[in-house]
Amino acid sequence: MKFVGVTACPTGVAHTYMAAEALEMAAQELGHELKVETQGSMGIENELTPEEIAAADAVIFAVDTSVVRADRFAGKPILNRGVSEVIKHPREAILAAVELVEKGGGGSEQTATVKPGESGQPRTTSRDTEKEEKEKRKVLFGWLKRK
């Protein structure tokens, strides 16, 4: 399947890019195509074209803030996940997007379809536990070492 995604967090620094990389790696491992647009402190990078969006079976939002120009995804099935959740469980996000497509758009509280003129809705996240924070730091430092 073909997917497009957007990652964004309130500060738009490391977690935005970590989530993008995690999704890309998981999609590749699972045999799917994915292009991710990052909306970070540097603005929009790797911007999705209208053609890429049109060709996608679904959209994955890994965001903790609003998606800029979310109306571009109008009519597409959208899977919403928090950034931390995607960093920790990227395969599950890809598999959930596959399931969303196979079910014809889904309809659970984790999914949404953006209508023309709407913006993406921020996903509220619970406070991470100490163990989760340690795992995020481990992933972050591993990501920074590769760059």
Image (cartoon, rainbow, N blue to C red):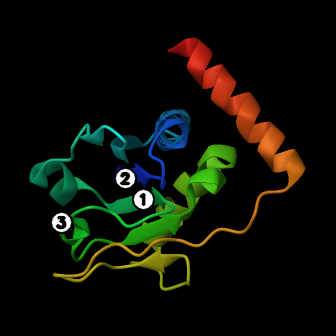
Task: Evaluate if marks 2 and 1 touch, with contact meaning CB atoms under 8 Å apart.
Answer: yes
* Residue beneath the point at 85% across and 56% down: 129
Distance Cα–Cα, label 2 vs label 1: 6 Å
* Residue beneath the point at 57% across and 61% down: 82
Rendered position, 30 above or below 10 = above
Task: Evaluate if marks 1 and 3 touch, with contact meaning CB atoms under 8 Å apart.
Answer: no
* Residue beneath the point at 18% across and 65% down: 72
Residue 104 is situated, as x and y percent measured from the top left of the image, at 39, 78
* Residue beneath the point at 21% across and 74% down: 74
Local crowd size for mark 3, using a 10 Å CA cut-off: few (<14), some (14–19), many (≥20):
some
Q: Nearer the viewer, residue 10 or 23?
A: 10
Q: Is residue 79 left or right of residue 39?
A: right
Q: Nearer the viewer, residue 7 or 100?
A: 7
Residue linked to disc 2 = 6
Distance Cα–Cα, label 1 vs label 3: 13 Å
Secondary structure under tag 2 reads strand
Residue linked to disc 3 = 72
* Of the image marks 1 and 3, the number of the one nearer the N terminus: 1
